[in-house]
Image (cartoon, coloured by chain):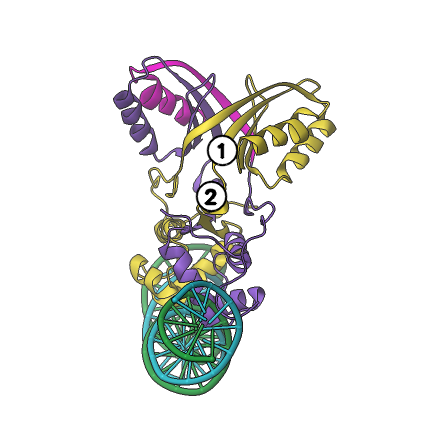
Chain colours: A purple, B yellow, C cyan, D green
DNA sequence: ATCGTCCACCGAATTGAAATCGGATGCACA
DNA sequence: TGTGCATCCGATTTCAATTCGGTGGACGAT
C-alpha cells in the first residue's frame, strides 16, 4: 500500500466517479479533458492500485422495509485484544450493521444499525450485542436524520505535481 | 415516494449492484436469470423510482492524504428548529464531514469527519463547530477503525410476491 | 368459463461504448 | 545531446447497451 502521488487529473477522476460511478468512460474522459483510452487506463490503474476500492449502488433503505435506524454506543469492560476482535467480527457480520466504528473516548464502539422496526431493534440489541460478556454499558440512540457526503473530502490540492508524460 | 413492492429479482439486482455497481448489464442479467433487455428495464425503473439513489466509487481516504478520522459528539443548548437547521446545513457543507447524524439521546448530533492531520482536526472543530452559538457540550473521539457494510441490510425476504407478468 | 387487456419478458437489430495497440511526444537523466 | 520511459492519442476491433416489435401468462370483467 504505497502512496503514489495523484495529480490533478486523478483527483478529478476520483471526484467524478465518487459522484457518479456509472457514467460512461467517454463522458468521464471528456469531463477531465483526456482521450477515452487514456482515461480508461487511469481508471484501471487507480482501481488496481487500490485507490478506488469499489463501486456501490446507494439503495434507499425505505424500499427495503427499513423504517428505523439507530446508533448504539458500546462500552467494553475487559479490553482484551481477542475479545475485542471477536466482538468486532461478530458485529460486522450482522446484516443490520451498516457502520462500525472503533473509537477512543467515552465509548469504545459506535454501531450504526438499520432495522425493520422497534421490535427488530430490541431483539438485535438484546440478542446480538447486550448478550456478549465483554460489554459494559450500552446506549441506543434513534436516528432522526442521516446524511452521507457524496463528494470527496478533497480540500486544497496541496499543489499536486503535474501529470507525467508529455502534456502540461 | 410510494413504496412499490419489490420482488425477489429486484432484491437480487439491488444486492448485486450494491456489491459491484460497475458490472455490465449483461453479467447482471445473467446472474439474476433475466435477458439483458429485461434486466436493463428493471434497473432503469429502480433508478427512476428513487430506489437506487446513485452509484458511487469508494475511494481510499489515505490516497487523498487523510490520516485521521474522528467522531464529534455535539450537544445543543437551544433546541430551536431554525438554529438546528442552520447548524445542520453548515456542517453538511463542510468537505471534511462524511456522515452527519441527528439523534435522540444524550447527544444531539454525531459528526463523522475525515481530516489531514491533528491540526486540521483542531482547526475544524474550533472554527466550524465549537464557535457556533447554539452548541452545548462537545466531545471528539478519534476513530481507530471504521468498517462500512458493502451488502444490503436485507434480512428475510418476508415472502415477497412473485414477479408480475408471465414468469414465476 | 371466456374474453380482453395489461404487463413483463424475450431476442434480433442497431447504435454506441469499451478495449486494444502502434506510434508519437515530451521529460528525466545521463 | 542522446537515450529511455511514461503518458497520451486515435484508428480499429470487439463487445455491450439500447431499442422495439412480438409473445404469452395473469388477472379482472362480463
Chain of the residue under the numbered disc 1 shown in the image: B
Magenta stretch: give its range. A117-146
Q: Which secondary structure, mark 2?
A: helix
For marks 1 and 2, give the CA distance: 10 Å
Q: Quadrant of residue B33?
A: bottom left
Residue displayed at 48% across by 30% down: A69
Marks 1/2 in contact by CB < 8 Å: the verdict is yes
First in sequence: mark 1 or mark 2?
Answer: 2
Q: Does the magenta stretch include residue A109?
A: no
Q: Which of the image's four quarters has the C terminus of chain B? A: bottom left
Nearer to me, B55 or B136 = B136
Instruction: Classify A3 as above or below B105.
Output: below
Q: Which secondary structure, mark 1?
A: strand
Residue at which label 2 appears: B61
From where the camera sits, is residue A116 visible?
Answer: no
Coordinates of residue A59 in the picture (x, y in percent): 46, 46
From where the camera sits, is residue A3 visible?
Answer: yes
Residue at which label 1 appears: B69
Q: In which quarter of the image is residue B150?
A: top left
Amino acid at each position: 500500500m504505497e502512496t503514489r502521488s495523484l495529480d490533478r487529473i486523478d483527483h478529478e477522476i476520483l471526484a467524478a466517479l465518487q459522484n457518479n460511478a456509472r457514467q460512461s468512460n467517454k463522458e468521464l474522459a471528456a469531463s477531465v479533458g483526456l482521450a477515452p483510452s487514456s482515461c480508461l487506463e487511469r481508471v484501471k490503474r487507480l482501481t488496481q492500485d487500490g485507490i478506488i476500492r469499489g463501486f456501490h449502488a446507494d439503495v434507499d433503505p425505505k424500499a427495503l422495509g427499513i423504517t428505523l435506524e439507530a446508533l448504539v454506543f458500546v462500552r467494553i469492560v475487559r479490553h482484551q485484544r481477542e475479545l475485542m476482535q471477536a466482538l468486532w467480527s461478530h458485529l460486522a457480520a450482522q446484516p443490520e450493521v451498516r457502520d462500525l466504528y472503533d473509537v477512543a473516548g467515552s465509548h469504545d464502539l459506535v454501531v450504526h444499525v438499520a432495522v425493520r422496526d422497534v421490535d427488530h431493534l430490541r431483539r438485535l440489541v438484546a440478542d446480538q450485542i447486550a448478550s456478549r460478556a465483554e460489554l459494559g454499558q450500552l446506549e441506543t440512540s434513534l436516528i432522526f436524520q442521516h446524511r452521507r457526503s457524496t463528494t470527496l473530502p478533497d480540500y486544497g490540492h496541496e499543489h499536486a505535481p503535474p501529470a507525467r508524460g508529455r502534456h502540461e
